[in-house]
Each structure stands twice: as structure tokens, then as C-alpha cells.
Image (cartoon, helix red, strand yellow):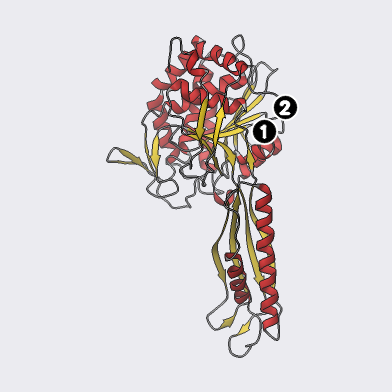
Amino acid sequence: MRTGNKTSTILKLFTVVGLTQIGFTQAVAQTVDITPTPHVQAEYAKVIADSRIKEGLAELERKEPEAIQEQFRLTEIPAPPFKEERRAAYFLEKMKERGLVDAYIDSEGNVIGIRKGRGDGPLLLIAAHLDTVFPDGVDTTVKQRDGRYYAPGIGDDTRGLATMLSVIDVLNRSSIETEGDIMFAANVGEEGRGDLRGIKAIFRDHPNIDGFISIDGVRLGRITNGGTGSRRFEFQFKGPGGHSFGAFGLASAIHAMGRAIAKISDLEPPSHPKTTFTVGTVDGGTSVNSIAADAVFALDMRSNDRQQLAILEQQAKDAALEAVAEENARWNNGEITVDFVLIGDRPVGRTDPSSPLVQLTAMTFRELGVDFKGLSISSTDSNVPMSLGIPAITITGGGDGGGAHSPDEWFVPTDSHLGPQTVWLLVLSLAGVDGTSSALLQSR
């Protein structure tokens, strides 16, 4: 942490360019000015001057080797999609050991603990996700070679989980009382077909949450303040089916599917705002000598704009209906139908760069000497609160790494203590420190 008369560094006008965030979706380049308001500057200056908060920063750095070992232990507890129970049970135990004695697992499988404040401030949610993309049977043993630690999921997101535990621990050991309540959550369902189910459940069950920070991955320096939305469907085609020779003349579910895929592939979504689609998987039929009675493909559609995503969805559905009509018209017995089954819905969202949450994060990077790499738009747990108009960002837990979502995912604890330190300063600035500073997160 920088010390001495550094007020001028806090007053600096942050001009940044949004970049691609590694491990997430493509970000839209954006040049913005992040100008901390006088009120935010004044309250933040009080926070960083508090001797207890300075000691917390020092303790987080001292205890970082322990945090790394905790990260490795979490990594070696498998947490496949929809099977996060073992890791959740372990995390609940660790939350309670660190002072959140009333922590619990909710009906969706999220681990939740609340550190009560003075009672007259906002409710801030800090979260990291339990699940990984890896199925049952994948070896998650941490192995060291060539100066790196390798294991599936070692960065995404056991780094976020370990960072959160460090902050809970130091906060519990301190004499600091906050104005607002701080909810900590290890949530399920961030990856793939989990469809953000854990965070969706938390915001459904706790509508009084005022702000949100997701800790996800490694390589500290970017602020994800935008949420790329996605709609995912299975297009399911059905027909009578029959023998390829004896029943020739019947319409085919696979032929209809092929026509639909061809039509969808010719769609031309806008490049700004970035809007994309892909048919990711196909399946169907019984055998090579059968007219297919069923066929299905999975379609992923994404956009940084809610309206463009809705337009693309309608275009894709219209294309499939046209394909079915053409297939039915082609043959004497056309009985093909298509159903659209929603399998994923991640809402579009955005937190304005002028939000105190974004201002504080940029200031904290500056204060800790973190290279501020800009703003980004990605698909993370923050999509949900952003879509609800709740201030939300995603940052990483610190350290270096790469290979996310691959068996060769790796982590190196280079300056990894800066992750917990960043969260520490953000939590106390937003929730307010009794007797020191007022909460910079507004109650809604």
C-alpha cells in the first residue's frame, strides 16, 4: 500500500480503454473517464488512513501463503456442474471457523454467511462460485512443475473462494464494525448450463441487496462492469420417421434440422453492439437406414444489447419455422414440427462507470499499485444484479494464471496478496466503517 501524502494520486482522472477479459467473452473496447467525486475521494481517504485497516492490509499479505494452501485444498475437492455439494460443505465449515457461525447452505446449494453491521447501512454481497466446468472423474490434484501449479479449476474459481475466505478471516479478527451488513456467498451454477442459477436464487431470496462484487479468476487489473447476455435453446424437431427405403417420401426431422441450420448460418447480426450465434451441438436419428423421427441442435446466442439479442432470437426461430415448412412441402407426408426449449438465459446488464463501485475499484488499484487495464464486458455472475439495476462488478482474486476451462489450467501466486487487499478496501469503503467513514454504497 502506498503511504505518505498521496492524495493527488487519488484525485487523478482515470482514462481507460476496455479490453478483452481472458477466460470470459469478448469485451467491447470503450474509452471512458472515471472521475472520483469529491465525496468518494474524501470517504476513501478516511478508510485508507485508518490504522486498523492498514493492519488488515499487512495481515492479508502475511497470511497469503496460508491462503494459497487453502486454494489448493479447495481445488482438490471436485465441484462438477450441479454437483457442488462436497465443496459447499467444506466451504461452510471454513466460513464458520472464520467467525460466520450462522452460515448456512440455502435451498439452491449456495453457502451464505452474513457479517452484521451497525444496522443502519446497506447490504453488500461478495461472492465467488463453487462450480467448475469439469465433469466427474477429472483429476483435480494440484501438481507443480516449471514454477507453476497445475490443476483443473485452480484459478476459476478456487482463487476467488480463497480470496473471500482471507477477507472474512481478517475482518473477523479485527475490531472493525461496519455500518452496513456484508453477505458472503460461495454460489453454485456459474458455469455453462448452471445458467447463473446460484446468483439468481440469492437475488430472488434477498431482494434487499444493494450492491455486488463477484471475485472470479486471476490476473488482477480489469473491472468487468458490463454483462454480455445470452439465450440458449434446443431446437427440437419431430416427425413420423420410417424405413429409408420402404417409407421413402416421408419428411425427415434431420433434413428439416439441416435446412434450419443453413438458414441460421446466413443470419447477419450487427458487429456493434457485438451480437453472435453458433449451433454448438447436433443430435438425432436412429440409424443410417432410417428416416429420422427426431433431431435436435443447441443454439447459443449472445449480445451486449438486450434488444439485439431479442431480434436475433426471433430471426433464428423464424428461420427454423421456415425450414420446417419447406421440408413438409417437399414431401407427400409432411408432419415435421419444431419446439424451442430454453436451456440458458443470462441477462444483459451494465454498471455505469460513474458508479461509486467502479470509482472505488479504480482508486484501489491505484492505491495498491495494481496496473489498471480498463473496463470490460463479460458473462459473469454480475449479469444478474446488473440487469436488476443493482451496482455490480466482477474482479479477479489476484495472482497469475492461464488455461482456464482446460485440464492444463495453471496458477502462480505472483503478488496474489493484492487480490484480498483489493476486496478488503472495497468492502470497508462500501459498507462504511463505524467511527471512521460513511458507507459509499447507497441503500436502494
**Could you tell me the amino acid type at mark 1?**
Ile
The residue at the point 58 percent across, 45 percent down is 189
Q: Earlier in the sequence, mark 2 or mark 1?
A: 1
Along the line of sight, the residue nearer the viewer: 325 or 240: 325
Left or right? Give the position of 122 relative to 357: right
Q: Residue 21: give x, y in percent of width and height.
A: 48, 41
The residue at the point 68 percent across, 19 percent down is 121
Along the line of sight, the residue nearer the viewer: 10 or 228: 10
Residue 103 visible: no
| Residue picked out by circle 1 | 390
Residues marked 2 and 1 touching at CB (< 8 Å): yes
Query: Circle 2 — which element?
Result: loop
Q: Residue 391: give x, y in percent of width and height.
A: 64, 31
Along the line of sight, the residue nearer the viewer: 257 or 37: 37
The residue at the point 56 percent across, 69 percent down is 283
Q: Quadrant of the N terminus?
A: top left
In this picture, is 431 found above or below 140? above
Q: CA distance from mark 2 to mark 1?
A: 9 Å
Query: Circle 1 — which element?
Result: loop
| Residue picked out by circle 2 | 444
Circle 1 crowding by C-alpha within 10 Å: few under 14, some 14–19, many from 20? some
Q: Residue furthest left?
A: 146
Circle 2 crowding by C-alpha within 10 Å: few under 14, some 14–19, many from 20? few
Quadrant of the rendered structure where residue 147 is? Answer: top left
In this picture, is 333 found above or below 134? below
Q: Residue 53: give x, y in percent of width and height.
A: 50, 14
**Could you tell me the amino acid type at mark 2?**
Arg
